[in-house]
Image (tube, helix red, strand yellow):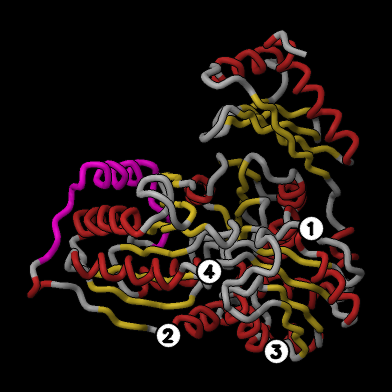
Amino acid sequence: MTLIKSISGIRGTIGGSAGDGLTPLDVVKFTSAFGAWALKKTGIRKIVVGRDARLSGTMVNNLVIGTLQGLGINVIDLGLSTTPTVEIAVPAEQAAGGIILTASHNPKQWNALKLLNSTGEFITDTDGKEVLEMAENSAFDYASVDDLGKVATDNSYLQKHIDQILSLPLVDKEAIAAANFKVVVDAVNSTGGIYVPALLEALGVKTVHQLYCDPTGHFPHNPEPLPENLTELSAQVLANQANLGIAVDPDVDRLCFVCEDGKMFGEEYTLVAVADYILQHVKGNTVSNLSSTRALRDVTERAGGEYHAAAVGEVNVVTKMKEVNAVIGGEGNGGVIYPDTHYGRDALVGIALFLTHLAKFGKPVSVLRASYPSYFISKNKIELTAGMDIDGLLVKVEEMYMSQPHSTIDGLKIEFDKQWVHLRKSNTEPIIRIYSEAEDEAAANDLAHKIIADIKGILNIQ
C-alpha cells in the first residue's frame, strides 16, 4: 500500500494499515490538521468539499465532512464535482479553504485530499509543511457538542461554473453553435461525464456522443488522458464522423483532444492552441513548466509576448504567472490556467476557448494542429543506487554544459537551440527523470541517450 504526503495534499491507496495507505485513520488525521490550519490561518469556520466519482469517494467524503464538523467547521458539500469547480466555489463562499477528494489521473485504488487555501488555490510549500507538522504532532482540538459544524449541500456550482465560462469575452457561444460541431466525449466514468456534456449543451453543441460518461467510478481504462489510453475515443470519432474527440481526467483539470482523422492532437498542444487563441486577442506573457513543449514559447514570441518557465507543479506555475502577469499559462499535461476565471487548471474553460478558436479557424482540427511548430518529447529515466548524491551528480552534468543556456530552478534543464533536456530527481525513489524535446522523435531520443551516456560516464558505469 502507498501513502504519499506532499505540500499540496495527501495521496494514497485505499486499505491496508494506518500510515501505509489512505486509511480512515489517515483521512481523519490529515483532515483534522488541515481544518485546524485553515481555521488558525483565517478565523473562518467554513470549508468547501467536493469529490470525483471514484469508488472510495463516498467513504472518504463522509470521513472528511464528519471530521470538519468535529472541529466546529461548517461544510459546503458540492458532492460530485470537479477540481476547478471547487476552486471557484471557495472564494465565492468566502470559505477558509477547500478539500477536493480526487487522486486525479491515478487508477481506481487511489484517492487523495487536495488542499486549497482561501483564494481557491493550492496551498504553498510553507503552508503545506505546516499542515504536515500539525498532523504529525496532532496539533488540533475538537469542538464540544454545542459547537459542532453544520453541513449544507450545494448543487448549484455546476451551473455557476458554466455561467462564469459563458460570460468570458473570448468565449463565443454563437460561433460555436454556428459551427455545428459533432463531438465525442470520454469522461472515464467520472464527474466529467456530468460537467462536460452540460457545458457543451450550454455552448450550443447539438451532437455529443458520450463515451464513458456515467459517473460510476468504474474507470474503463487507465484514466490518464494519454494516447495509449484513448484508442476507443479515437475509434468513436471516426465511427461517428465527428469533428473532434474530447478527453478529461477524473477530476476534470486535464484536457486533450482527438482530431477528426482519429489522430491525437497531443496533450502538450492543448495549452499551445488555447494560448494561440488568447494571444490573437490579448497581447501578453505566458508560462508553462520546464518540462512542457517549446511550442508555447514559439507561439508566444510570434505574438509579441514573452514566455517564462516555472518549476514543475501547478502551484509553481501559478506563482510565476502572477509574477509576470501572464494572460495564459499551464502545463504540458493538458492543464490550462486562464486567470480571467481563476488560477487553477480547468478543462472546462479550456474546452470553451478551444471550441471558439476552432470555430473561428474554420478548418478541421488536424489542420489547426499542423499550423503549430511540431516537436516531440521523449520521456526516459535512469535508476541509480539508493542513497546516491543525485544533487551532486546534477551539478557535474551542469558543469559539462556550462556554456549552454540552462536553468537549475527545478533540477537541471539544458537548451540546445530549439532542443532541450530536463533532468529531475524523483522525490520517492532513486531515479532521475530525463525529458528531452526536439523537432522529431529520433532527435529527441538521441539527445536523451547522449545525456544518459554522460551520466553513466560520470558514474563510471556501463
Q: CA distance from mark 3 to mark 4?
A: 29 Å
Residue 218: percent from left, percent from top: 61, 71
Q: As shown in the figure, which amino acid type bears the numbered disc 1?
A: Pro
Q: Residue at x 73, y 31 (%)?
A: 421
Q: Residue at x 79, y 58 (%)?
A: 227
Q: As shown in the figure, which amino acid type bears the numbered disc 2?
A: Asn
Which of the marked residues, 1 or 2, is nearer the chain's N terminus?
2
Q: CA distance from mark 3 to mark 2?
A: 23 Å
Q: Secondary structure at mark 4?
A: loop
**Residue 108 — which label?**
none
Give the labeled residue for mark 3: 204
Tell me if I can see residue 88 in this picture.
no
How many marks the image carries: the answer is: 4
Give the labeled residue for mark 4: 54
Q: Secondary structure at mark 3?
A: loop
Which of the marked residues, 1 or 3, is nearer the chain's N terminus?
3
Q: Is residue 134 magenta?
A: yes
**Residue 227 — which label?**
1
Q: Residue at x 26, y 70 (%)?
A: 66
The residue range painted magenta reads 120-143
Which of the marked residues, 1 or 4, is nearer the chain's N terminus?
4
Give the labeled residue for mark 2: 155
Q: Quadrant of residue 417?
A: top right
